[in-house]
């Protein structure tokens, strides 16, 4: 890779949707509530993303409340991965008789 004097050094990327917003955390009675105000043109898409994240956090809260923090994070990631990936069909070994020619 070649470097030219005066060339731009930062990566050219688009802004992440969830970074384009203002958030405020409110603590009351042992609970923290996060209020988000999206500042991006794709507000509808952001609202859907935030709704899905809230559902995942609710799942972790109901299922993994007694787990250590590391296991809660794993439960959150497992939930998200299960929601965004297709389930694979059950694996069955190939028929050895079908390979004989």
Image: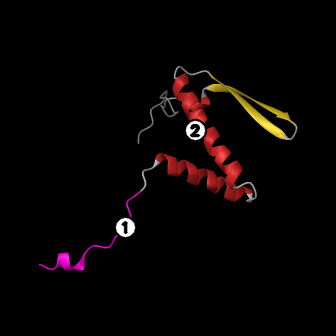
Q: Residue furthest left?
A: 101
At x 34%, y 70%, the residue is 92
The residue singled out by tag 2 in the image is 52
Residue 90 in the image, given as x and y percentages of width and height: 38, 64
- What quarter of the picture does the C terminus occupy? bottom left
The answer to whether 100 is drawn above or below residue 65 in the figure is below
The answer to whether 61 is drawn above or below residue 28 in the figure is below
Mark 1: which secondary structure? loop
User: What's the magenta region?
Assistant: 88-101
At x 55%, y 31%, the residue is 48
Which is the main secondary structure of the residues drawn in magenta? Answer: loop
Mark 2: which secondary structure? helix
Residue 16 visible in the shown view: no
Asked whether residue 57 is drawn in magenta, I would say no
- What quarter of the picture does the N terminus occupy? top left
The residue singled out by tag 1 in the image is 91
Categorize mark 2 by other alpha carbons within 10 Å: few (<14), some (14-19), many (20+): some
At x 73%, y 33%, the residue is 34
Q: Is residue 6 left or right of residue 27?
A: left
Foreground residue among 6 and 30: 30
Foreground residue among 21 and 53: 53
């Amino acid at each position: 890779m070649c470097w030219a004097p005066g060339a731009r050094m930062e990566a050219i990327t688009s802004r992440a949707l969830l970074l384009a917003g203002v958030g405020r955390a409110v603590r009351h009675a042992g609970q923290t509530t996060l209020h988000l105000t999206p500042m991006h043109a794709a507000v509808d898409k952001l609202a859907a993303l935030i709704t899905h994240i809230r559902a995942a956090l609710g799942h972790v809260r109901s299922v993994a409340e007694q787990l250590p923090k590391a296991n809660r994070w794993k439960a959150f990631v497992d939930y998200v991965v299960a929601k965004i990936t297709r389930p694979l069909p059950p694996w069955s070994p190939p028929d050895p008789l079908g390979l004989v020619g």
